[in-house]
Amino acid sequence: MFPRLLLLLASLGVRLAADTDLAWTTLAPLFRPPPEFAGKFGVYRSPLLFREGKTVNTSNAWAGRRIEILGDWHQLMGPWPPVIERPSFEVLVTTSRGELIQQRVRLEIARGQTNEGLLLTPPGRGPFPAVLVVYYEPETSVGLNQKQPLRDFGFQLARRGFVTLSIGTPGGDAWKPDIGRAQCQPLSFHAYVAANCWNVLAHQPAVDPTRIGIVGHSYGGKWALFAGALWEKFAAVAVSDPGIVFDETRPNVNYWEPWYLGSDPVEKRPKAGVPTSDNPRTGSYRRIIEVGRDLHEIHALIAPRPFFVSGGAEDPPSRWTALNHLVAVNSLLGVTNRVGLSRRSGHTPTEESNAQLCAFFDHFLTTQGATP
């Protein structure tokens, strides 16, 4: 079968014999950079250099370097509150959607804060792999928003045998997220919320806690990227066109905004938009840029877990120059084929890009899936 036909079958929830091998057939070309970007590392400082300049050349040394990178980013963004080991969880409404069970749930996302989400469970006994789906609100992710029909990652994955938990912005307003009393930047707090949601999923009887991934589109992609990097228990990470490096030529790669990394109790930006002399960087984003850090270090924290970028307008093939640093870390750790980047012309997901996302999780999180 041709790869596009396989992707179409995946998007329809069709599973075939040796399905995971077929999934890899469709994915394999996406896990190799184009020739013009192979071995190119761009302007980014290698994450395989310690802060003082010593080279990381063993897996044990990488463990120390990873701690250093993680600590630096938490220092730059502000510390997390303690992760909640057993968040409260309540089922509000249970309905059937064909073979799927859909439950509206209320869960504890931080001390003193709850959020409602939608939990989809496939038929069968389990335990199943699971995926946390993050976006503005959960309804879009489970296919209940007809205005955004191609962002229903939770529904599509559930049809393929995954338990999915779809959640929305803490507090409900993505431009003014409710971070409670946390002392970290809003995007880091989103990652903290995802860590608590991981604990919710891990304690579901139908879920295999060793096979929980995370995915999000655009704003949700930024959220999934930071969550997957800062919370090591996510087994696989996929992001849809969030802008995977800082890029002030792209208004939608807007990590500088106060609802991401630019929150500042003293200095407020005059307006939203690309930083300029009249509209300067603020908050942690300004400090991160001043000390010369970039998101390729966040990517490196995901190693050796699989990472897939469903690229569009914001993440073209040239992003391989950043991703090649993650490939290098994985190579040091003895693994290959863990970093992928697909390409579409626009920002909005397509049937093909969604099928690629499903194939990614199918390959890396199903029991039969194995990294080649």
Image: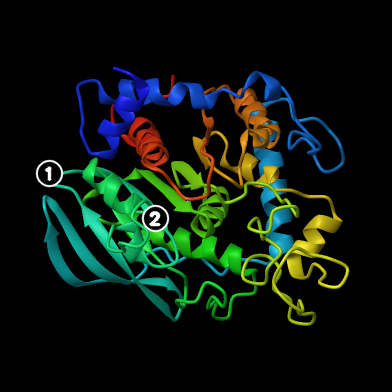
Q: How is the image coloured?
A: rainbow
Q: Nearer the viewer, residue 287 or 9?
A: 9
Residue shown at the point (26%, 25%) measured from the top left: 19
Q: Secondary structure at mark 2?
A: strand
The N terminus: image quadrant: top left
Q: Secondary structure at mark 1?
A: loop
Residue shown at the point (35%, 65%) measured from the top left: 138
Relative to 347, is 72 on the left or the right? right
Residue 100 pos. (x, y %): 15, 52
Q: Which residue is mark 2?
A: 133
- Residue type beneath disc 2: Val
Q: Nearer the viewer, residue 240 or 207?
A: 240
Position of residue 59 relative to residue 307, above or below, is above
Q: Which residue is mark 1?
A: 124
Position of residue 111 relative to residue 353, above or below, is below
Q: CA distance from mark 2 to mark 1?
A: 21 Å
